[in-house]
Amino acid sequence: MSKHITPSIRRRRFLQTTAASAAAIVAPAIMTSKRTRAQDVIGKGDHVFHAIHGWPQLPAQYQWQTTHNVAVDHEGLLYVIHEGRPQLADHPSIFVFDRDGKMVRAFGAMFQGGGHGIEIRREGSEEFLYVAAYQQCKTIVKMTLDGQIVWQRYAPLSCGLYRGDEASAPSRRWGRDAFMPTNFAFLENGDFLLADGYGSFTIHRYDRDGNWQSFFGGAGDGQGKFNTPHGIAIDARPGRDKEIVVTDRAHNTLQTFTMEGQYKTTIEGFGLPANVETYGDLMIVPELVARVSLLDTTNQVVAVLGEDIERIVADRDANNGGFVIRTREDQWQQGKFVHPHDACFDADGNIFVAEWVQTGRITRLVRA
């Protein structure tokens, strides 16, 4: 049964979002992340980290592009996917780095211009990459960790949501009848969920072989409806009923659902939340405007990392609604984020953050 938003899951903070999402939220000062001069750390309480911006290094023959998402495998290798540039058709979009930040392999030129979501899933004794690509790619792909394709799927036309040529002739066309997948979440029985965050605004369910099963959601402003359902995760933290969490980005909220896709609650107070992941008792929410939030099992904020909302919003170009600072690397500051687009934990609870900035940036947050 649907539940209304309750005061216990409200967060009051001030921010201004993009033209597509002009909500205003007020933030208490106690939630502001700080970098102490003595220790050069960010966070508070039990959640304090050294921020190492630009942590991985690319060989000279490659170039950083707009970084989108990150994932870590069982060996601790970091996988980074770029949106990429269509004119650089032979340039990899996926780079893999060891624990020292050195590149060990690169692949995925097929995603140039549309690389977006990347997740790693263990299936039996083997791990696989799942990649969601939007814009002219409009595809989801299961790959081995060295980039070999296991299967590839295009728009699931049988669901009745998409224009007929979305599967046979993908293009850069946007719209609610376009297939523009963004991120994955995985179910225990082998099925998976896919957020069509830029297209139909729905959440699709597939079986383990990539066959479409069903969907829920769609465009709208009510409970269970979305405006850019960009990120998704299964929240199975201890002491809670397992549920689906969707980042309803342009509404500045998270929405939660039963495992069958029935609406449960809305959690307010974010600045364009882009994705979500859990680790132990924590849930991490990277926000494009302009911070990373850590929530406890009651979905209360316990730390905000790298917050720089006022400066980032003040630099917004009023003519086109864009955030100009994403193109000005010389204005980025130590211990502050610009546009966090994804975040993931390693096995030790350290965090990797990918930012939606023109020259790409990966930050490693090491527990202090």
Image (cartoon, rainbow, N blue to C red):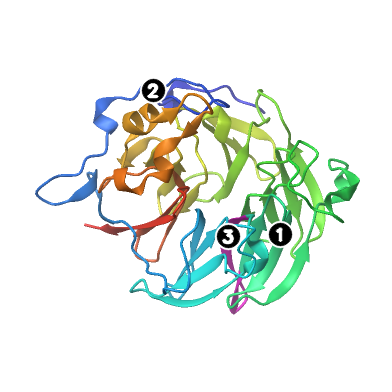
Q: Position of residue 297 (x, y in %)?
A: 42, 42
Residue type of the residue flagged with mark 2: Arg
> Which disc, if any, is residue 118?
3
Q: Position of residue 3 (x, y in %)?
A: 60, 25
Q: Earlier in the sequence, mark 2 or mark 3?
A: 2
Picture residue at 72% right of the left edge, 53% below the top: 136
Name the residue nearer the viewer: 186 or 152: 152
Q: Residues within 10 Å of mark 1 (few under 14, many from 20)?
A: many
Residue type of the residue flagged with mark 1: Ile
Q: Residues within 10 Å of mark 3 (few under 14, many from 20)?
A: many
Cα separation between marks 1 and 2: 37 Å
Q: Is residue 69 above or below residue 337?
A: below
Q: Secondary structure at mark 3?
A: strand
Residue segment shown in magenta: 115-128
The number of numbered badges drawn on the structure is 3
Is residue 352 something one can see in this rendering?
no
Which residue is farthest front? 87
Name the residue nearer the viewer: 350 or 37: 37
Q: Earlier in the sequence, mark 1 or mark 2?
A: 2
Q: Is residue 124 above or below residue 216?
A: below
Residues at circles 1 and 2 in contact by the CB criterion of under 8 Å: no
Is residue 338 something one can see in this rendering?
yes
Q: Quadrant of residue 55?
A: bottom left
Give the residue number, with chain letter if any, for mark 1: 140
Cα separation between marks 1 and 3: 10 Å
> Which disc, if any, is residue 12?
2
